[in-house]
């Protein structure tokens, strides 16, 4: 399998998996797809559904400086940092929604799927997202 086309197929699978998770409630440290997830749990589920091995952390709060840990994880899982202004389906974004509050989102269908703490559920938000994107990882 060509690594580039294989990576894009896996990325499309991540996007489809994310779209299938719209609706369930947000819960900090939630890890039960279809029942309750947070943004880390949502990303972990969508990656694992597409044969991308990951063990999501559980030792974090809504606010904190976790960017370095996220960068190490995505780099070790075979992702590459790309330009935040050119997202593709299946990309994983890191946004800063408040001071020191990071949030993960999955690019899908001209928008972003994410576990939204304020809305208390997993949603699809069309572009523009409205938060600054700090990093964008691609398979």
Image (cartoon, helix red, strand yellow):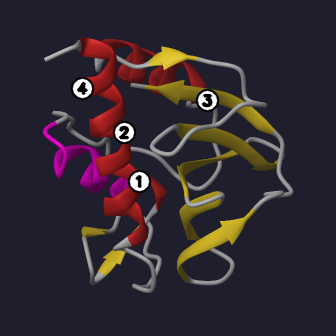
In what element is the residue under mark 4? helix
- Comparing marks 1 and 3, which lies closer to the viewer? 1
Cβ atoms at labels 1 and 2 below 8 Å apart: yes
Q: Which residue is mark 2?
A: 11
- Comparing marks 4 and 3, which lies closer to the viewer? 4
Residue at the spot x=40%, y=23% of the render? 74
Q: Which residue is mark 4?
A: 6
Tell me the quarter of the image containing the C terminus: top left
Residue 112 image offset from top left, x and y in percent: 61, 58
Q: Main secondary structure of the magenta part?
A: helix
In what element is the residue under mark 3? strand
In what element is the residue under mark 1? helix
Q: Is residue 43 above or below residue 20?
A: above
Residue 2 image offset from top left, x and y in percent: 21, 14
Residue at the spot x=40%, y=19% of the render? 79
First along the sequence among labels 2 and 4: 4
Label 2 vs label 3: CA separation? Answer: 13 Å
Q: Which residue is mark 3?
A: 136
Would residue 70 be found to the left or right of residue 85 on screen? left
- Comparing marks 2 and 3, which lies closer to the viewer? 2
Is 44 magenta? The answer is: yes
Q: Nearer the viewer, residue 63 or 125?
A: 125
Cβ atoms at labels 2 and 3 below 8 Å apart: no
Label 2 vs label 4: CA separation? Answer: 9 Å
Label 4 vs label 3: CA separation? Answer: 19 Å
Q: Which residue is mark 1?
A: 15
């Amino acid at each position: 399998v060509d690594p580039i086309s294989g990576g894009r197929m896996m990325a499309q699978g991540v996007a489809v998996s994310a779209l299938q998770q719209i609706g369930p409630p947000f819960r900090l440290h939630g890890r039960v797809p279809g029942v309750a997830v947070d943004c880390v749990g949502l990303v972990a589920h969508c990656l694992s559904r597409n044969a991308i091995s990951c063990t999501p952390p559980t030792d974090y709060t809504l606010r904190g400086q976790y960017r370095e840990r996220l960068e190490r994880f995505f780099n070790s899982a075979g992702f590459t940092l790309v330009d935040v202004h050119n997202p593709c389906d299946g990309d994983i974004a890191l946004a800063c929604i408040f001071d020191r509050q990071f949030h993960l989102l999955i690019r899908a269908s001209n928008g972003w799927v994410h576990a939204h703490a304020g809305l208390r559920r997993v949603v699809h938000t069309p572009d523009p997202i409205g938060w600054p994107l700090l990093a964008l990882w691609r398979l």
